[in-house]
Structures are given as structure tokens and as C-alpha cells.
Amino acid sequence: MAKQTSHTSTSTCKDIRPQYASARIGNEVFYIPFAYYYRVRLGTVGKLLSWMLIYLLPVFWYSYLATDSMSYVFVLNFMLILLSVFTLYETGYIHNDTFATMHEERPAIRLYEHNLTYFYSHWKQIFLIRILYADIALAAFLLVNGITVATALTTACILIVPFLFFVYNTWRQRYNVLLYPVLVFSRYIPFLLLYDAGWQLYLLMFLSFPCINMLERFSMPSYRFAFMKRILPDEDSKTLFRVLYYLVVTPVLLFFFSPFKLIPFFILGVYRISILVLLRFYRPRNYLQN
């Protein structure tokens, strides 16, 4: 409870940015995989669909291309990797929204007071249970694939995702934005480690979303770099920028890759154009809320 009090007292002296994605956030989200991300970071079905397109679609498609098989083992491996990787990544979000915000001058507060009170009283068991989820998924992965492949995945899950998130959350300076694209891509990479995937698939996976996400991060008010000011002068300009990104990148990639390999780019391009049209009539809740 002492930590919750510390957070409250220090936050009253800061420029608070309330960013509550959901009208109600239950404490069960701390324990249920994917629930925290949906209720605290997304908050709407529309943003869940967006997450499925920018994350699940690329990792699934390029994993499939790497193995060229849609067997039940492939699907099982995909689900186990997703559970282990994203549970740990989600734990990084929790750490960011609770401990890391204590050291920010202008923190984004995404959890309600009752959530923070509960978390600071139970944070050890919350982290322990989430690590246990990842351990169970990795143990099952080992049984299916053997120790050699499981070791590579375990290394990626333990060292890449949690380590990068910890460094990112504790390095609260302007230039920590340079680490952000590596952090984002770290949740994509483990899906290809199981297979003998060439560098082309890693490149396409990066360009499908982490690359544009990196450019947008460089334009955020807290981090904005001079070279991005004209391209993305404000948050609302991101909508058109996303459309232009896929309209430019996709044709260029067609000179080097078959259309079959670029299916995520076609789908994401259509999706971004649809959002641009939709915004002429309706602005979805939580749109462009970071």
C-alpha cells in the first residue's frame, strides 16, 4: 500500500495525462493473458481488430511462409509462442503503467485508483503468475519441438522481450525512443525462430508494421525529431501518413517479392484506406490514443 500512496502523492505534482481506454477496469485483468492489453491499452473492438491486423496477421502469415505447412503442429506452436511472448510483453505494459510512470514528468495514467491500489498490494504475485503462464507455454513447446528449438525460443522470450522492456521502462529519456522499434519488433521475431526463415521474411515482417510504428514514435510530441516534424506535424496527420506508407512501400516491394508474400501489406493498405474514409463520417472511440 505504501507504493500506491507514493505514486498518488508524486503524481499530484505532475502534468497528468488521463488515458483510460475503458470506463471500467477490473483487477482480474492483471491475471488473465491478453485481458490487460484489451481493457487498458485498447478498450474497443475496433482497436482489437486493428491489433489483429497489425500483429497477428503478419506473424501468422510469415510463420506460415517459413514452414509452408498449415498442420496442427504449426497451429499449436503458433498459439504457444503467442501465449508466451505476449504474456511477457503484456507484463512489460503493466510495469510501464505502474512503476515506470512514477518517474515521468508527464505520465499517461491508464489505470484507475482502485487498480493501482490493488496492484501495489499484489504486484509480486501478479508478476509471478504471469511468468508462470509463459513457463507453462514454453514447457509445452519443448515437449512438442525438443530442447534445441525450445532453447532458442526461451532465450528470445526471456532475454529479448522482458529485458528490452525493462531497459525501455527504466531509461526515461528522450532518446529511449531509439530503443522502441527494437522493443516492438521483439514481439514479432520469436515466431520465425522456429523455422529456417531467410532474412527476407524478417524484413517483410518489420516493414509490415514495426517500421511505420517506429516512424510515428519519432513524431510524438514527447520525442519529436526535426526530420519528422514536416511529415507528421501532429497526431491527426498519422491517418493519412499510414495510407501513404502502404501506397508507397507496397508497390516498391512488388519489384522484389511476389504478391503472395505481400498479402499482409495489401490487407493493411485496404484497412488504412477504410479508416481514412470512415473518419469523414465517424471518429471511433480511443482513436489515436497512445
Image: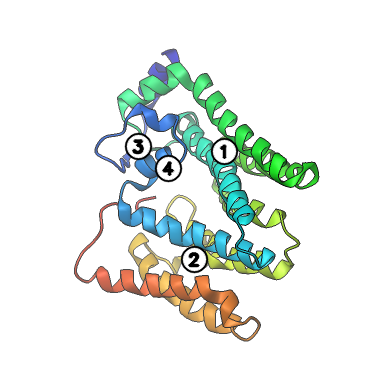
Residue at label 4? 37
Instruction: Work out how far the residue at label 1 is from the one at label 3, CA to CA, in angstroms.
Output: 29 Å
Tag 3, which secondary structure?
Answer: loop
The percent position of residue 139, horizontal first and vertical second, equals 67, 35
Residue 190 % position (x, y): 66, 51
Measured along the vertical axis of the image, is residue 105 above or below residue 226? above
| Residue sitting farthest toward the top | 2
Q: Check disc 1 and report the residue beneath it.
A: 88
Hey, what amino acid is under mark 1?
Leu
Q: Nearer the viewer, residue 99 or 246?
A: 246
Q: CA distance from mark 2 to mark 4?
A: 28 Å
Rounded to the nearest whole Å, what is the CA distance between mark 2 and mark 1?
A: 31 Å
Looking at the rendered image, the disc whose residue lies closer to the viewer, 2 or 1, is: 1
Q: Secondary structure at mark 1?
A: helix
Mark 2 or 4, closer to the camera: 4
Binning the other alpha carbons within 10 Å of mark 4 as few (below 14), some (14 to 19) or many (20 upward) gives many
Mark 3: few, some, or many residues within 10 Å (few <14, many ≥20)?
few
Earlier in the chain: of badge 2 and badge 1, it is 1
